[in-house]
Image (cartoon, helix red, strand yellow):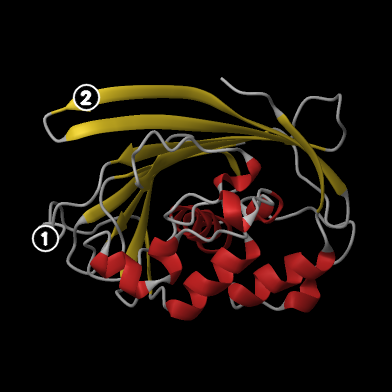
Amino acid sequence: MQDRVHRTEACTLTTVRRTAAMLDLDPEQFHDGDPLPRGWHFIVLGGETRRSALRADGFPGFGVPMPDLGLPRLLLAGRTVEYTDDLEIGAQVHRRSWVSKLDRKETGNGSTAIVTIHHELGRAANVPPAIIEEQTYILLGPATGRAPPTRPTQLMSGQYEKTLLPDETLLFQYSALGFNSHKIHIDRDYARNIEGLPDLVVNGGLTTLLLTEFMRLDVGVVPARVSVKHKAPLFCGRRITLTATQDGDTWQLKVHDDTGVVAVVGEVQVQ
């Protein structure tokens, strides 16, 4: 779809330790040369989009120019991450990113577009990537009113469960570490008055990170592939519950909001 963006990013110890601090882990346990925990690669996906080139909603596109198409709202629909190797703390990371797919549709609710951004991260420019990530976004027209309330769809159940409370500090720190200025995560007035949402929205990437950490620390699973789909938004200051259930070599994941609604479904395949 577009020219590929080639960049060399530094996976610095300082940023890794700040990520650990955000996750309330001991930063001093991480050192140069250690493998980067899987899921933490978001720290090298931040772009350097100039402020004047941002979309009106503040979304930076992670270094890849995002189309506007006259559609002012952007929501993350899902992502898939495949790991064939680990990145190394302190190493230079070679990254290739591009818009791999763009589909525009006309629906009863107006125009929409689906955009997929493809990222490849590796140890060197001309070797197979260690991590491949695809993010799928939905572009929408202006909000027409308050988002309708959701209703519980399923009881929370799983072999493993964990409840968390994403607050303003967590959203701020994650957005800062990823250099993500999307206003629905950092500007409460924008989220409420422009997007018609009840509060700040928990970053989709943050939700994936929390799920990956849940699997790593609570379940003891090293993922080879993680995929998630977002079915409903999660909001700041409201408890979320993560669940994991094993199905052979695959783990089925769900994230429930504070009312029991299944907001995210996912799957982890192990090595």
Q: Name which residue lies at 83% across and 61% down.
A: 12
Q: Name which residue lies at 31% across and 62% down.
A: 234
Mark 2 — residue?
106
Mark 1 — residue?
149
Q: Name which residue lies at 75% across and 71% down.
A: 17
SS at circle 2: strand
Residue 89 percent coordinates (x, y): 83, 56
Q: Give left or right: position of 93 versus 161.
A: right
Please identify the quadrant where the N terminus is shown. top right
Which residue in the rendered view is the most extreme toward the front?
52
Please identify the quadrant where the C terminus is shown. top right
Q: Give left or right: position of 230 versus 5.
A: left
Position above or below: 108 against 252: above
Residue 227 percent coordinates (x, y): 46, 38
SS at circle 1: loop
Badge 2 local density, few (<14 within 10 Å), some, or many (20+)?
few
Amino acid marked by disc 1: Pro
Residue 160, quarter of picture: bottom left
Position above or below: 110 against 254: above
Mark 1 and mark 2: Cα distance apart in space:
25 Å
198 or 270, nearer to the observer: 198
Mark count: 2
